[in-house]
Amino acid sequence: MSTKRLLGVFAHPDDEGVVSAAILKYNALGVETGLVCATRGEVGEIADPALATPENLGQVREGEMRAAAEVLGVHNLWFLDYRDSGMAGTPENEDPRAFAQVNAAEVVGKLVAIIRQFRPQVMVTFDETGGYGHPDHIAIYRHTTSAFHAAADAVQYPELGPAYAISKLYYGAFPRSILREMGEWMKSQNYQGSFSELDPEKLGMPDELISVQLDAEPWRETRDRSWSMHRTQANSGPNLGQMPEEIQRKWRSYAYFQLAASRVGPDVPGENDLFART
């Protein structure tokens, strides 16, 4: 096992796009990488009815996630086996099996077990907005943040192995300035999709909170290929290919992260290294 390890913790297959550029960058440097999916995205959209049905979508999306992980070179993949909650206000969100309804201590325990087994120096999840407010994204943000602290505390979950302290916790960020530009473009195009109702002034991360901006351009082709494995989700957002090139470049050519907690000190502006001082 490599001495350096990076763990991404997310809610659904395809959420790993937040950290995929970092995974590719650090894989190339010999870092071992891992991903956690809380659910299999069972109530997500289906881009093409020939690809899946509502009954087997979770199984299909698990296969898509495994294919994407293979493209990214991720050999450590965990599913927490919870059910996709769907968006707020939907019947699925009220289902007692939904991830958003699960007891927090149970989820944190599962994450602590993975952390103590995998022993990452760096862990990445969503920020408090969940990117765009999805209840599962917000839930995984809360539980992962709790697990960062619990894994290091020998008093908590002693049956799950020796305590282990992760050096740094990052939130994968969608810069608010870019979301604002995307929102203005969608409004100008009279875009009428699920993302058109989002308020860019409340979602995403204020730009001044972003501490690491990784150049994703060297891995853009591989990152796009990994995303293409999620075939059932191909039309789940606005068509980035139609957006002005400048917006696309900011969105696709960089990966943005906020240092949420550190046991090794703050990031230095411009350093742009998730593993600095680990």
Image (spheres, rainbow, N blue to C red):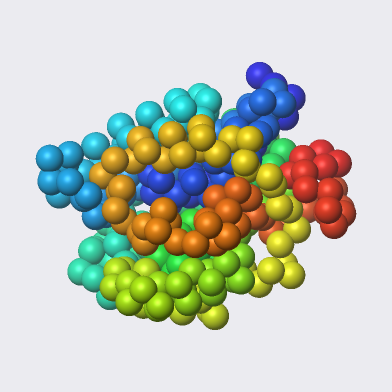
Front position in the image: 270 or 85: 270
Residue 219 figure quarter: top right
261 left or right, relative to 78: right
Nearer the observer, 103 or 158 = 103
Q: Residue 220 at x, y = what percent?
A: 55, 39
* Residue 91 against residue 161 in the figure, above or below: below
The answer to whether residue 80 is visible is no
Q: What residue sits 71% from the left and 52% below the top?
A: 213
Residue 22: in sight, yes or no?
Answer: yes
Rendered-image quadrant of the N terminus: top right
Tally of numbered discs: 0
229 or 118, nearer to the observer = 229
The quadrant where residue 135 appears:
bottom left
Q: Is residue 6 above or below residue 130?
A: above
What residue is at 35 percent from the left and 35 percent from the top? 229
Q: Is residue 133 above or below residue 10?
A: below
48 vs 13, nearest the viewer: 48
Does residue 126 appear left or right of residue 166 in this picture? left
Q: State the image coordinates of residue 231 (x, y, percent, origin top left).
A: 29, 40
Q: Residue at x 60, y 57 (%)?
A: 250
Left or right of 113 on screen, residue 208: right
Q: Quadrant of the C terminus?
A: top right
Picture coordinates of residue 14, whole percent (x, y): 41, 45
- Please tell me whether residue 35 is drawn above or below residue 177 in the rendered image: above
| Percent x, y of residue 216 | 63, 43
Point out the residue furthest to the top here: 1
Task: Give the left or right position of residue 276, taking residue 132 as reference.
Answer: right
